Image (spheres, grey):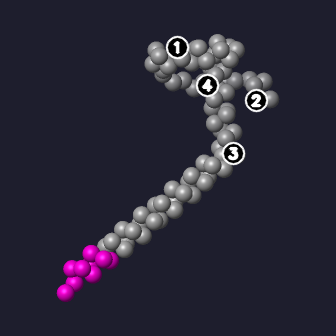
């Protein structure tokens, strides 16, 4: 489907010599004909995962929010206690 579309836009990015060699090795090992195909596949995979995020990733986000809220509450309580201790 997407692979059969005529491609008329180009995206470029730079790689270190080590990155280039590592990606070439991945292409050879997986039978991918070019770094362009490897990059296109990786980007398409990333875009697809954004449409159906991993439930563990959502749970991690929820846990981060809970920790942030707890931290704010601890800060609030700590400031209240400090204020209370400095009052005569």
Position of residue 53 in the picture relative to residue 83 (left or right): right
In primary-sequence order, the first of circles 2 and 1 is: 2
Instruction: Name the main secondary structure of what is drawn in magenta.
Output: helix
Residue 2 is marked as 2
- Frontmost residue, 21 versus 83: 83
In primary-sequence order, the first of circles 4 and 3 is: 4
Q: Under tag 3, what secondary structure?
A: helix
In primary-sequence order, the first of circles 3 and 2 is: 2
Write the residue at 19% across / 87% down.
Answer: 88
Tell me where residue 1 appears, x and y as whole percent.
80, 29
For disc 1, the marked residue is: 21
Tell me where residue 59 appears, x and y as whole percent.
60, 54
Tell me where residue 15 appears, x and y as whole percent.
48, 20
Disc 1/disc 4 C-alpha distance (Å): 14 Å
For disc 4, the marked residue is: 39
Tag 3 and tag 2, C-beta contact below 8 Å: no
Disc 3/disc 2 C-alpha distance (Å): 16 Å
Residue mark closest to the camera, 1 vs 3: 1
Disc 1/disc 3 C-alpha distance (Å): 31 Å
Disc 2/disc 1 C-alpha distance (Å): 27 Å
């Amino acid at each position: 489907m997407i692979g059969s579309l005529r491609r008329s836009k180009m995206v470029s990015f730079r790689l270190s010599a080590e990155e280039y060699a590592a990606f070439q090795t991945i292409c050879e090992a997986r039978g991918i004909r070019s770094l362009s195909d490897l990059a296109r596949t990786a980007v398409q995979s990333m875009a697809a995962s954004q449409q159906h995020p991993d439930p563990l990733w959502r749970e991690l986000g929820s846990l981060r929010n809970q920790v942030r809220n707890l931290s704010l509450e601890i800060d609030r309580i700590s400031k209240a206690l400090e204020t209370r201790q400095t009052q005569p």
